[in-house]
């Protein structure tokens, strides 16, 4: 069972990580909203523990963006004990709500319940033009043509497709697809993009992966000039 904790207070984050790990969960901690959202989109978590007041993106914004594609159960953590906040969180698709300060056993009980319940099973299909990426079954097609990708190519395509229309830098792509940081002058990303293009673009008249010179790459259906 994997848990993502999105919490900007280092002490609380470390405390939750330790406690949940001691209870048998595998735990990642993100310390701001944007990082938390990206992890939540890229990894498969069983439950997300989401603080409301966060740098870069608050918990509401994270949940709203996440719910566009993911049904991962979310437990909100907040210092605010306000009925309107609670209603707002649940309306946006939060699954449960815990007010700080809370007892760890209480949090653990809520996490266990959410983990047991799990997300509603639905297929997740990302579409860019006639390209379809079936995330759960890890299948890719363009129109009627089935395309076989390596796991790395699939991760790269999934990242681009999830953030379609958004230009991603080579450094961003490297850190999410290879889970490491390296200098942006490396050509690892370029090589991977070239291989991916050979599979999803070269044989098709409409090219989906666009190079934005000096910036990075974006996947989108480009309007005809
Ligand atoms: Ca906070």
Image (tube, rainbow, N blue to C red):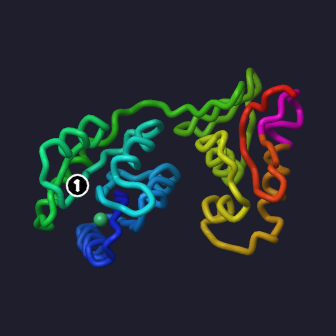
Image label count: 1
Q: Is residue 117 left or right of residue 136?
A: left
Magenta portion: prevailing SS class: loop
Magenta stretch: give its range: 198-208
Q: Residue at x 62, y 45 (%)?
A: 158
Q: Is residue 158 left or right of residue 88?
A: right
For image coordinates 49% across by 49% down, the residue present is: 41
Q: Residue furthest top?
A: 144
Specify whether residue 108 is painted magenta: no
Query: Residue 174 location, x and y as percent?
Result: 68, 63
User: Left or right: where does residue 108 sit relative to residue 184?
Assistant: left
- Indicate the quadrant containing the C terminus: top left, top right, bottom left or bottom right: top right
Q: Position of residue 72 (x, y in %)?
A: 37, 44
| Relative to 56, 51 lies left or right | left
**Quadrant assignment for ligand 1:** bottom left
Alpha-carbon neighbours of circle 1 within 10 Å: few (<14), some, or many (≥20)? many
Whether ligand 1 has any atom under 8 Å from the Cβ at mark 1 is answered as no
**What residue do we see at 33% from left, 76% from top?**
10
Nearer to me, 144 or 52: 52
Measuring from the top left, give residue 133's x and y in whole percent: 63, 35
Magenta segment includes 199: yes
* Percent coordinates x, y for residue 18 in the rendering: 28, 75
* Residue occupied by mark 1: 111
């Amino acid at each position: 069972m994997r848990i993502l904790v999105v919490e900007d207070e280092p002490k609380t984050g470390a405390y939750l990580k330790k406690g949940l790990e001691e209870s048998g969960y595998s735990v990642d901690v993100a310390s701001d909203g944007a990082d938390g959202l990206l992890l939540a989109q890229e990894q498969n978590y069983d439950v997300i523990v989401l603080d409301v007041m966060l740098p870069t993106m608050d918990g509401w914004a994270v949940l709203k963006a996440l719910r566009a594609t993911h049904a991962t159960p979310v437990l909100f953590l907040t210092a605010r004990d306000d009925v309107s906040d609670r209603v707002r969180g649940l309306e946006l698709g939060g699954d449960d709500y815990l007010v700080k300060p809370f007892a760890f056993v209480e949090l653990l009980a809520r996490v266990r319940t959410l983990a047991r319940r799990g997300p509603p099973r639905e297929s997740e299909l990302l579409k860019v033009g006639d390209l379809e990426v079936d995330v759960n079954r890890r299948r890719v097609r363009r129109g009627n043509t089935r395309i076989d990708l390596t796991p790395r190519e699939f991760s790269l395509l999934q990242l681009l497709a999830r953030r379609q229309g958004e230009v991603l830098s080579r450094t961003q792509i490297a850190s999410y697809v290879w889970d490491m940081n390296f200098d942006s002058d490396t050509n690892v990303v370029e090589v991977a993009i070239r291989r991916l293009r050979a599979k999803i673009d070269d044989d098709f008249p409409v090219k989906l992966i666009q190079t934005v010179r000096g910036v990075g790459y974006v996947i989108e259906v480009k309007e005809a000039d």
